[in-house]
Amino acid sequence: PLTGTRTLINNLAATLKLNTTLPYRVWFQGKQVAGWVQVYGNTLSFATVRGASHEVPFSQPERSLVLFKAFLQGQTPPTVMM
């Protein structure tokens, strides 16, 4: 599913003529890798949460909160350790 989703997102970005503004990289929750993120232009973002199941807030509540707060603030999740 991850590989297929990344391919779909890459194709969508190409169709919309969006350039990668943040290459695929890890994002952090505290000092741990929380997942991976890639941003295309200022329009499209793709993020994963490491160790999560289909119910991310249930299986990874702290990581999902960090990701959700970043979304509400219009920012990417932290890409440096804090």
Image: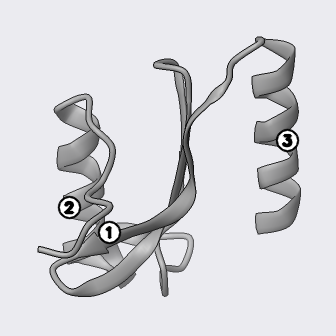
Upstream in the sequence, badge 2 or badge 1? Answer: 1
Q: Which residue is under mark 1?
A: 57
Three-letter code, disc 3: Leu
In the rendered structure, the answer to whether residue 77 lies left or right of residue 45 reads left
Q: Quadrant of the N terminus?
A: bottom right
Three-letter code, disc 2: Leu
Locate residue 33, reporting x and y percent: 37, 82
Q: Residues within 10 Å of mark 2 (few under 14, many from 20)?
A: some
Q: Which labelled disc corresponds to residue 65?
A: 2
Frontmost residue, 9 versus 23? 23
Marks 1 and 3, Cα distance to the nearest angstrom? 24 Å
Any part of residue 1 in sight: no
Q: Residue at x 25, y 58 (%)?
A: 78
Q: Residue at x 20, y 61 (%)?
A: 65
Q: Please say if 4 is above or below 14.
A: below
Q: Quadrant of the C terminus?
A: bottom left
Circle 2 or circle 3, nearest the eye: 3
Upstream in the sequence, badge 1 or badge 3? Answer: 3
Circle 2 or circle 1, nearest the eye: 2
Frontmost residue, 72 versus 20? 20
Locate residue 30, reporting x and y percent: 15, 80
C-beta proximity under 8 Å, tags 2 and 1: yes
Q: Residues within 10 Å of mark 3 (few under 14, many from 20)?
A: few
Marks 2 and 3, Cα distance to the nearest angstrom? 26 Å
Locate residue 79, reporting x and y percent: 32, 61
Frontmost residue, 50 versus 55? 50
The total number of labels drawn is 3
Q: Residue at x 80, y 38 (%)?
A: 10
Q: Please say if 14 is above or below 28.
A: above
Upstream in the sequence, badge 2 or badge 3? Answer: 3
Q: Which residue is under mark 3?
A: 8
Q: Secondary structure at mark 1?
A: helix
